[in-house]
Image (cartoon, rainbow, N blue to C red):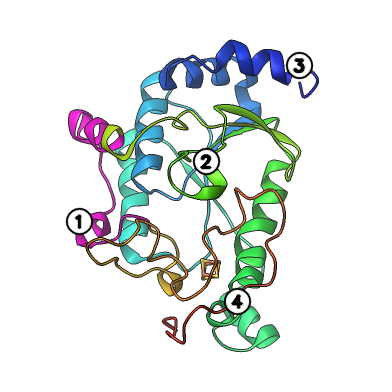
């Protein structure tokens, strides 16, 4: 697949999101899965996938630190769409992590925490697949600005499909309203981007949509969509991260 990637990419870059999803499911059958953290883009992807096939593979990297609102939404997704969400986790419980690294690892070494709780479990999960589907968009972060709709994921050595790569925030919300897609209630309370409760705060008017993620650090990505490990993070401000 990797050898023919350029040809495949050129052939499919012009496809709409739904057609690209359909092609992905038809091509990879049971060897493709959708990853979701149930942000609004992820909900669009889930809704679109459920219109194509009821039995698609859906997983989340469950850090154990999601907001209660996110776990509620996951229950709603399973009921509404009739899909089972596979909860992929590290074997290191939050208590084990605290014993090994001290309390609140995320507050001083978020890269280490994300590596343990997100990146390593994802690597393990993807090793059993031929392709994965994400809901990333180019205008979300600088790292994502060059995302293709189909690309080779060097980090995880697998084909990556990003059907919403060229969507805008407006398109996403239009789709949600048009199809009455359920979404995380936190989006209505100032959380445009939602990750773990320890590392996500509401944004203020005028702030960047991802300013509430790892606030006070240079970090903008958890490492699932970055090609190489990020350099050791530098604290930008003394603003403490929440420890709950
Ligand atoms: S987002 Fe925060 S709590 Fe979640 S895995 Fe990363 S550093 Fe840890």
Residue drawn at (26%, 55%), measured in percent from left and top?
187
Estimate how packed mark 4 is, as few (under 14), some (14 to 19) or many (20 or more) residues with alpha carbons within 10 Å. few
Mark 2 or mark 4: whose residue is earlier in sequence: 2
Residue drawn at (29%, 32%), measured in percent from left and top?
171
Mark 2 vs mark 1, CA separation in Å: 26 Å
Q: Which mark is residue 35?
A: none
Q: Is residue 5 magenta?
A: no
- Residue 82 visible in image: no
Q: Which mark is residue 4?
A: 3
Find the magenta span and give its range.
Answer: 172-193
Residue drawn at (67%, 84%), measured in percent from left and top?
101
* Element type at mark 3: loop
Mark 4 or mark 3: whose residue is earlier in sequence: 3
Task: Find disc 4 in the rendering and name its residue.
Answer: 234
Mark 2 or mark 1: whose residue is earlier in sequence: 2
Mark 2 vs mark 3, CA separation in Å: 23 Å
Task: Find disc 1 in the rendering and name its residue.
Answer: 188
Mark 1 or mark 3: whose residue is earlier in sequence: 3
Please name whichever residue, 63 or 165, is drawn nearer the observer in this view of the structure: 165
User: Where is 230 relative to 182, above or below?
Assistant: below
Q: Is residue 188 magenta?
A: yes
């Amino acid at each position: 697949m990797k050898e023919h990637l350029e040809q495949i990419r050129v052939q499919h870059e012009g496809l709409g999101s739904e057609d690209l999803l359909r092609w992905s499911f038809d091509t990879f059958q049971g060897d493709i899965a959708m990853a979701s953290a149930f942000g609004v883009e992820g909900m669009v992807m889930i809704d679109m996938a459920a219109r194509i096939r009821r039995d698609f593979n859906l997983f989340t990297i469950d850090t154990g630190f999601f907001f209660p609102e996110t776990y509620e939404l996951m229950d709603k997704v399973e009921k509404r769409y009739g899909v089972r969400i596979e909860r992929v986790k590290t074997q290191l419980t939050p208590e084990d992590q605290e014993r090994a690294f001290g309390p609140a690892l995320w507050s001083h070494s978020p890269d280490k925490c994300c590596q343990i709780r997100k990146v390593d479990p994802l690597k393990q999960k993807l090793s059993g697949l031929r392709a994965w589907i994400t809901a990333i968009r180019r205008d979300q972060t600088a790292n994502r600005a060059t995302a293709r709709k189909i690309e080779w994921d060097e980090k995880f050595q697998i084909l990556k499909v990003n059907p919403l790569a060229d969507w805008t925030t407006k398109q996403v919300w239009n789709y949600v309203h048009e199809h009455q897609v359920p979404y995380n209630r936190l989006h209505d309370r100032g959380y445009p981007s939602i990750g773990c409760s320890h590392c996500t705060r509401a944004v203020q008017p005028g702030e960047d949509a991802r300013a509430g993620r790892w606030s006070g650090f240079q970090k903008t990505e958890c490492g699932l969509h970055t090609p190489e490990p990020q350099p050791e993070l530098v604290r930008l401000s003394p603003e403490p991260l929440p420890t709950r």
